[in-house]
Image (tube, rainbow, N blue to C red):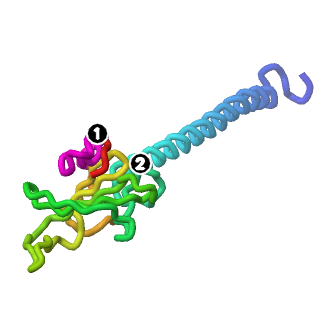
Amino acid sequence: MRGGHGKHGKMGSRLKFHRLLVPERSFVLIKERLLKTVFRLVVALALWGVLLSGMESGLGLPALAADQLPVEPDVGTRLDELYDHEARLFIALYSLAGDGRIDYVTARVVREYARSVYGNPVYQTEAQPIFYWWNHTMWNDPEQDGVNGNERVYQENTDFDISRYKPCSFNRQPC
C-alpha cells in the first residue's frame, strides 16, 4: 500500500466514481439530445399540420395550396350569365382555362330586377358575390367582400348544376 492508496484509498474511490459518472453523463447527454430532436420533430409536424389545415379551411393563409379559391376572373373570360328568379341571384359562368368549359362560377344577390325600354333585363346587384363554385367546391362569402381569405367552404364534392337553368345542357347539347 504505497502512498496510502489502497483498495479503499482516496485515489481508488475517485477513479471508480469518475468511471461511473462518465457513462451516466453520456447517457444523460444522449437522452437530452434525443428529447430535443423528438421535440423539434413534433413541433415541425404540428406546424406542418396547422399550415395544411389552414389552407384547406380557407383561413387566409398564404396561397400555397392548389385548391385555394382564386379571385373573380376578368369579364373577358365570362362565358354566360344567368338569373335565378327563385334565389334572386345573378350568376356568372367563367372559363379560367380558356377552353370554353365552365370551371368557375360566381353568384351575386340581386337587389332590383327590371326590364329596359328594349325589353332587356337589367339587374342591380351587390358589388361582390355571395357564392363561388370552383374545383368541385361551393364557397360562401357572407361578408360579400371579395376573395380575401375569409370565404368558407359551403359544400365539397359538388359542381354547379347548369342543367337547372338550361335543360338542353343535360345531354351535353348546345343551347
Residue at the image point whose x is 39% and y is 58% from the top: 95
Query: Given the image, on which type of amino acid does mark 2 rest?
Result: Val
Residue at the image point whose x is 41% and y is 48% from the top: 50
Q: Could you say which disc has been placed on residue 50 in the image? A: 2
SS for dot 1: helix
Q: Which residues are magenta?
A: 154-171
Q: Position of residue 26 (x, y in %)?
A: 70, 34
Position of residue 138 in the picture relative to residue 54 (left or right)? left
Quadrant in the rendering for residue 37: top right
Residue at the image point whose x is 24% and y is 49% from the top: 162
Q: Nearer the viewer, mark 1 or mark 2?
A: 1
The residue under label 1 is 171
Tag 1 near tag 2, CB within 8 Å = no
Is residue 123 at least partly visible in the picture?
no
Q: Position of residue 124 (x, y in %)?
A: 14, 74
Q: Earlier in the sequence, mark 1 or mark 2?
A: 2
C-alpha gap between disc 1 and disc 2: 43 Å
